Image (tube, helix red, strand yellow):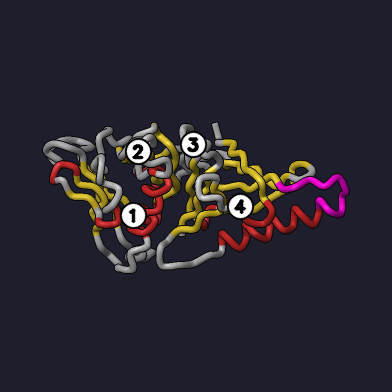
Amino acid sequence: MITIYNAAAVINGTDDLNVYQTKDFYGMESTAAGVVTSAYLGAVNHSDAGDLIALTVVSSGTDDADRINRIAAMDAMVSKNNVVNKQGFVVAFSEIENVKPGGITGIAVTIDS
Amino acid sequence: MVKPVENYLYFALTGTAGDAADDAVCYPVSTFIGATFASTTATILRFEDNTANTIDGAVSKKFNDVTLTHANINTNAAIHMDIVKAMAKIMANPGRGKVLTVVDTANGIVAEEFEGLNNTTQVSCGTAFGITQ
């Protein structure tokens, strides 16, 4: 299975469209209030460090609400990366297709350099 | 160790594919790592390095590259996504042990999954394959 991320409405950079093998999904960590960062095996420049995808969720201002929002985003990404279908792909997030699961409002990709 | 039976992806450049070094490549589906933007008219596919050292278990930080040339985003803003979705469908072929021709530019052959994406510009391999980039 292939997982597709599209971070921008116009694809004109290596961080606007990123595609990974679902099996190369290495999990997530909270990296700020309202931000969860996913890691995949690097697929753009090198593969000695991961490509990181920061998922921004609504930051409410309270720790408890942030925790709930963060879990919703993590839950959505786990769900996406566990999809199995005949087409062989799943769109985890897309600005072009307006696919924004789990309250994720935007993503930012940092590719291994 | 018994190597699992799996499908392989075949790509060939324009011209006399097979006559010269790096005119054509064939990689196991399982070695596909990912894909990303290459230009407004191209998407780059990454495959695992297949040098002898890597096959023997050495750690590699390199890739083999296949660049697919296609319609401009001015024609189809989602063309890069459409290309990778078509690639995913090809790689999800339920057959085992097949050589799946993705793009054979020399012979004007493209996988049927690309149908509908060829209306303005033929999907092709117009850029040299990058071996262990």
Mark 3 vs mark 2: tell me if same chain: no
Q: CA distance from mark 1 to mark 2?
A: 32 Å
* Chain for disc number 1: B
Please name the residue that numbered disc 4 is placed on. Answer: A100
User: Residue placed at 35% from the left, 45% from the top?
Assistant: B50
User: Residue placed at 50% from the left, 43% from the top?
Assistant: A18
- The amino acid beneath tag 1 is Pro
Please name the residue that numbered disc 3 is placed on. Answer: A10
Instruction: Indicate the position of residue A89 as horizontal and vertical percent values.
Output: 45, 58
Confirm whether residue B110 shows in the render.
yes
In this view, the residue in front, A72 or B72, is B72
Does A102 lie within the magenta span?
no
Q: Are marks 1 and 4 in contact (CB under 8 Å)?
A: no
Q: Nearer the viewer, mark 1 or mark 4?
A: 4
* Chain for disc number 2: B
Please name the residue that numbered disc 1 is placed on. Answer: B28
Q: CA distance from mark 3 to mark 2?
A: 12 Å
Few, some or many residues within 10 Å of mark 2 (<14, 14–19, 20+): few
> Seen in the image, is A90 located left or right of residue A35?
left
Please name the residue that numbered disc 2 is placed on. Answer: B75
Q: Nearer the viewer, mark 1 or mark 3?
A: 3
Q: CA distance from mark 4 to mark 3?
A: 16 Å
- The amino acid beneath tag 3 is Val
* Chain for disc number 3: A
Q: CA distance from mark 2 to mark 4?
A: 25 Å
- The amino acid beneath tag 2 is Thr
Instruction: Indicate the position of residue B86 as horizontal and vertical percent values.
Output: 35, 54
Quarter of image, res A67: bottom right
Which residues fall within the magenta stretch?
A57-66
Q: Nearer the viewer, mark 3 or mark 2?
A: 2
